[in-house]
Image: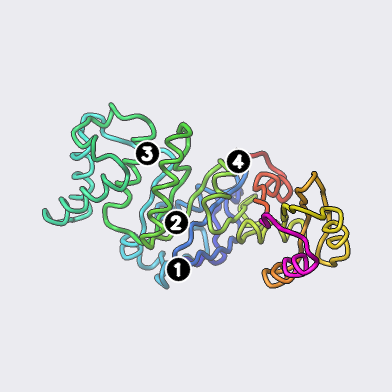
Amino acid sequence: MIKIENLTKQYGKFTAVDNLFLEIKEGEIFGFVGPNGAGKTTTLKMISTLLKPTSGNIFIDDIDVSKNIKEARNSIGYMPDFFGVYDNLKVDEYLEFYADIAGLNKADKKKMLGELLELVDLSHKVDAYVDSLSRGMKQRLCLARSLIHNPRFLILDEPASGMDPRARVQMKDILRELKRMGKTILISSHILPELAELCTSIGIIERGKIVISGTVDEIMKKVSGTNGVRIKVLNNTEKAINLLMEEPLVSDIYDNDNIIEFGFSGNEEDMANLIKRLVLKEISLASFNPLQSNLEEIFMQVTKGDVE
């Protein structure tokens, strides 16, 4: 759905984004990660048509953004890291203002605003003044604003910044629901564990270039060469360890009573065959689970900067 080629942005002699390539498939939640000054926000603004690239191309559904800005904007919903709100307006008035800008007719506007307020869990605040809302509520309201024209592609710059844990959980639930609705989402965030949990793919940017991208597991395998696995056995723990030590795709075995963790460099079919061999050797498996990759460790390995 989104294809970026040779994207570059220069400010005088300083290169903020350097010949960047990126592709985001339809229906993905793509996480954009990078240290301070890496070029994340600059890239998001160029994709959003708010900043003109020095060179390069951006395509959204095969639309050349630079040549068809108006058409591209119809497909884009942009939520910046810093957004303005009109404090003297009520929640419904605020959204009606942006619905009028988007050109919605009266019937469509009423239906859309009701659905958006329900989606972001603000129906009970419809008559509240914007300045009375908590930070989390204001951010959900801004997300609703970006959805007014029903875009297919959402660009969210630090959407959970400054939120308390409960508000971040609410935001994640909303983003998952948007994905179920068919939206494609590009999200920038410095809350790395939440990106690993939420995103289908990750791109790590440093000094204006993508240094690595893919699913978290794919990136972990690229960096370390293996994926982590944890198994729980009900019997024959020592026998299970000896069998694993004979497996060429298994490495770094760690034993803690009946819990065994190890690195695995094979694919899903290899994993299925390994489980089968353990069972045939009368090893009773209570569980067999991939370990959740640590995005913060990956980030520190592939970048030289500091986390934001």
Q: Which residue is mark 3?
A: 139
Image side of residue 213 versus residue 277, left or right: left
Residue at the extreme left: 106
Q: Which residue is mark 4?
A: 36
Secondary structure beneath dot 1 equals loop
Observer-side mark, 1 or 4, equals 1
Kindly indicate whether the residue at mark 4 contacts the one at mark 2 (C-beta within 8 angstroms).
no
- Please give the label number shown on residue 1: 1
Tell me the CA gap for discs 3 and 1.
Answer: 26 Å
Mark 2 closeness class: few <14, some 14–19, many ≥20 residues within 10 Å: many
Secondary structure beneath dot 4 equals loop
Secondary structure beneath dot 2 equals strand
Observer-side mark, 4 or 3, equals 3
* Label whose residue precedes the other's in the sequence (2 or 3): 3
Q: What's drawn in magenta, residue-wise?
A: 274-290
Q: Which residue is mark 2?
A: 185
Tell me the CA gap for discs 4 and 3.
Answer: 22 Å
Q: Is residue 217 above or below residue 1?
A: above
Q: Is residue 84 above or below residue 208?
A: above
